[in-house]
Image (cartoon, rainbow, N blue to C red):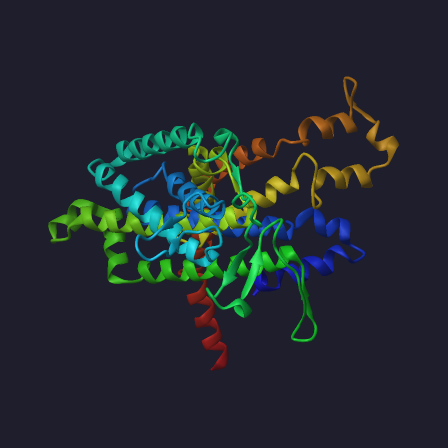
């Protein structure tokens, strides 16, 4: 419920008398959109790594594949004509939701191909070979002129020559009344919904992308709680025993990897749809997988929802300690609240308060996140959600439902 009400809550608080204090702690709505699509990617990473115990350091391949498919299709570079029919497939105006599914399927195929080789190995060797595949794809795309005139700098949605760049609509394909455009540049606002509600471009993207992420999350949860998911957990706990009782663990791992890749591709498609651009460094580079690992450790491995909250924690800290303090943050707050005399006060050996702020806060979010990461590994090894579940004795949803049932009695 909090996430549903967040845009309205943010709007009310940032337009109230406590606007400065509110924006210092609350991430912007645009930041929350990024939390959604990357959180889905981190959850797909946790699906394979947290539930089978196989760390996929090359998971960015699937994320980037989904993103590049959307951008290249929107630019008309993937269009093909079916012989003898004149039907054009993957034209630049293909429905975005169709592209999202195709992006997931492309990532699924890549996951199967990579998994067929990688799952011959275990442990650190599996992690390293997936990392190797990721680097091969990264270098290949970075130097591929088909992607863009300067592939290393990425590609943006411009549409075919002479055509209007397409809008990316989330909703029911081919039913215009049930679609809303998302994106930083080509999104749309909604006025007077139900007679009273109005949503900005960012808020429309927030709800529509959030809807796709929610459906994807529920589908992954359904798999986890199926007999198939139980076998995944058995592989994580003791693969030799699972094999001994008759399970073909190779096929189960490969199928889990394929499902994980599918949803990573969906996340990449949402990323490209919102940003309307993609580059090798923000989609295919191995550090993108590292960010998913960071989110999973902070949120909790083997929780599926934990990586989403881990990414929210990550983005909130980055925005709080951002160099420019866009949308609020500690740095501009201190600049506004401290008087000139306080800013020029000498702290130590000629170092003033102003210089200390610039030196220790300005643009050092990654430094403090690294320190927090170390602290999480040492003192909160189960992550935020994992630790909360341990304290409650089960999942949050289960405990809440049980306590509500007691209250009804």
Along the line of sight, the residue nearer the viewer: 154 or 89: 89
Q: Position of residue 287 (x, y in %)?
A: 45, 33
Residue 120 as seen in the image, left or right of residue 13? left
Asked whether residue 384 is in view, the answer is: no
Outermost bottom residue: 409
- Going 29% across and 49% down the picture, which residue do you hit? 258
Give the quarter of the image for residue 319. Answer: top right
Q: Say above or below: 247 vs 148.
A: below
Along the line of sight, the residue nearer the viewer: 83 or 39: 83
- Going 25% across and 51% down the picture, which residue do you hit? 255
Q: Position of residue 152 (x, y in %)?
A: 49, 29
Q: Quadrant of the N terminus?
A: bottom right
Outermost front residue: 84
Residue 73 as seen in the image, left or right of residue 188? left
Along the line of sight, the residue nearer the viewer: 269 or 326: 269
Q: Position of residue 34 (x, y in %)?
A: 55, 48
Asked whether residue 100 is in view, the answer is: yes
């Amino acid at each position: 419920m909090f996430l549903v009400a967040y845009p309205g809550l943010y709007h009310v608080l940032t337009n109230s008398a406590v606007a400065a204090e509110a924006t210092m702690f609350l991430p912007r709505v645009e930041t929350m959109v990024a939390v959604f699509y990357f959180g889905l990617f981190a959850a797909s990473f946790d699906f394979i790594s947290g539930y089978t115990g196989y760390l996929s350091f090359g998971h960015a391949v699937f994320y980037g594949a989904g993103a590049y498919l959307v951008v290249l299709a929107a630019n008309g570079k993937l269009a093909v004509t079916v012989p003898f029919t004149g039907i054009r497939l993957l034209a630049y105006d293909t429905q975005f939701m169709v592209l999202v599914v195709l992006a997931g399927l492309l990532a699924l195929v890549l996951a199967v191909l990579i998994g067929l080789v990688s799952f011959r190995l275990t442990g650190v060797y599996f992690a390293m070979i997936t990392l190797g595949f990721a680097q091969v794809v990264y270098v290949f795309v970075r130097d591929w002129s088909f992607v863009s005139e300067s592939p290393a700098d990425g590609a943006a949605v411009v549409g075919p020559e002479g055509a209007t760049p397409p809008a990316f609509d989330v909703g029911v394909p081919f039913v215009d009344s049930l679609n809303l455009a998302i994106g930083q540049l080509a999104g749309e606002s909604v006025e007077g919904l139900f007679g009273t509600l109005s949503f900005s471009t960012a808020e429309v993207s927030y709800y529509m992308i959030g809807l796709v992420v929610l459906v994807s999350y529920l589908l992954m949860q359904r798999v986890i709680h199926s007999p198939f998911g139980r076998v995944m957990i058995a592989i994580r706990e003791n693969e030799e025993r699972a094999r001994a009782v008759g399970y073909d663990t190779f096929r189960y791992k490969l199928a889990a990897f394929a499902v994980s890749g599918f949803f990573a591709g969906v996340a990449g498609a949402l990323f490209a749809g919102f940003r309307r651009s993609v580059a090798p460094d923000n989609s295919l580079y191995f550090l993108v997988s590292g960010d998913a690992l960071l989110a999973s450790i902070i949120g909790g491995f083997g929780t599926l929802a934990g990586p989403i909250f881990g990414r929210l924690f990550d983005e909130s800290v980055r925005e709080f300690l951002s160099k420019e303090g866009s949308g609020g943050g500690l740095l501009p707050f201190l600049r506004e609240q401290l008087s000139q005399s306080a800013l020029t006060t000498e702290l130590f050996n000629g170092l003033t308060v102003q210089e200390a702020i610039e030196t220790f806060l300005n643009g050092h979010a990654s430094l403090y996140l690294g320190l927090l990461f170390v602290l999480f590994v040492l003192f909160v090894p189960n992550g935020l959600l994992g630790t909360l579940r341990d304290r409650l004795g089960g999942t949050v949803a289960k405990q809440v439902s049980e306590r509500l049932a007691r209250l009804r009695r």
